Image (tube, rainbow, N blue to C red):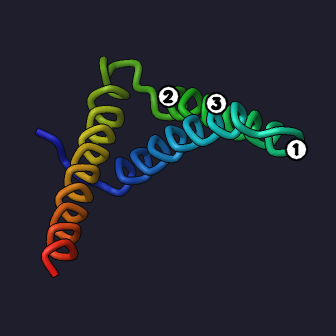
Amino acid sequence: MYNWDWLTFLQVILSLLSLTFIVVGALTTYFGSGKSRAAGISILIVGIILPIIMYFAWWRPNGSGYFTNSILLPGLLYIGGGIIGVAIGFGVFLGIIMKT
């Protein structure tokens, strides 16, 4: 089973940060113009390079699937749980607002 520790916490934060950089950088590059497009490209590049650095920094030669099992899957579960929690909270909020 999955054990929580500070290093995994840091790895998940960096994974989610790089995912955010990729999405925001792609959107800024596509919809921006001039300086904002250049900023979007740089954010996108950082978002792509950060997971590569993380992979080689925390790669274990003896641990097959370390990156996937210890960083990627917990990160996706955190994202999924966060989205579900926000959706439920937002639905309850809208329900209460619409009833009043």
Q: Quadrant of the C terminus?
A: bottom left
Count residues near mark 3 (Cα–Cα under 10 Å), then give few for <14, some for 14-19, many for 20+.
Answer: few
Disc 2 designates what residue?
A: 55
Q: Residue at x 60, y 42 (%)?
A: 24
Q: Residue at x 21, y 57 (%)?
A: 85
Report, in whole angstroms, how far the alpha carbon at label 3 lies from the one at label 1. 21 Å
Q: Quadrant of the N terminus?
A: top left
For residue 33, what is the image quadrant? top right
29 left or right of 22 in image: right
Question: In this orientation, which residue lies closer to the viewer: 52 or 94?
Answer: 94
Q: Residue at x 30, y 20 (%)?
A: 65
The answer to whether mark 3 and mark 1 are in CB contact below 8 A is no
Q: Which mark is residue 35?
A: 1
| Amino acid type shown at disc 3 | Ile
In this view, 67 is above or below 75: above
| Amino acid type shown at disc 1 | Lys
* Residue that extends furthest to the bottom in the rendered view of this protein: 100
79 left or right of 26 in image: left
Q: Which mark is residue 81?
A: none
The answer to which of marks 1 and 2 sits earlier in the sequence is 1
Point out residue 13 in the picture as x, y percentages from the top left corner: 44, 51
**Which dot, 1 or 2, sits closer to the camera?**
1
Report, in whole angstroms, how far the alpha carbon at label 2 lies from the one at label 3. 10 Å
The answer to whether mark 2 and mark 3 are in CB contact below 8 A is no
Report, in whole angstroms, how far the alpha carbon at label 1 lies from the one at label 2. 31 Å
Question: In this orientation, which residue lies closer to the viewer: 6 or 62?
Answer: 6
Count residues near mark 2 (Cα–Cα under 10 Å), then give few for <14, some for 14-19, many for 20+.
Answer: some
Q: Which mark is residue 49?
A: 3
Question: In this orientation, which residue lies closer to the viewer: 36 or 4?
Answer: 36
Point out residue 98 in the picture as x, y percentages from the top left corner: 19, 72
SS for dot 3 = helix
Q: Residue at x 52, y 43 (%)?
A: 20
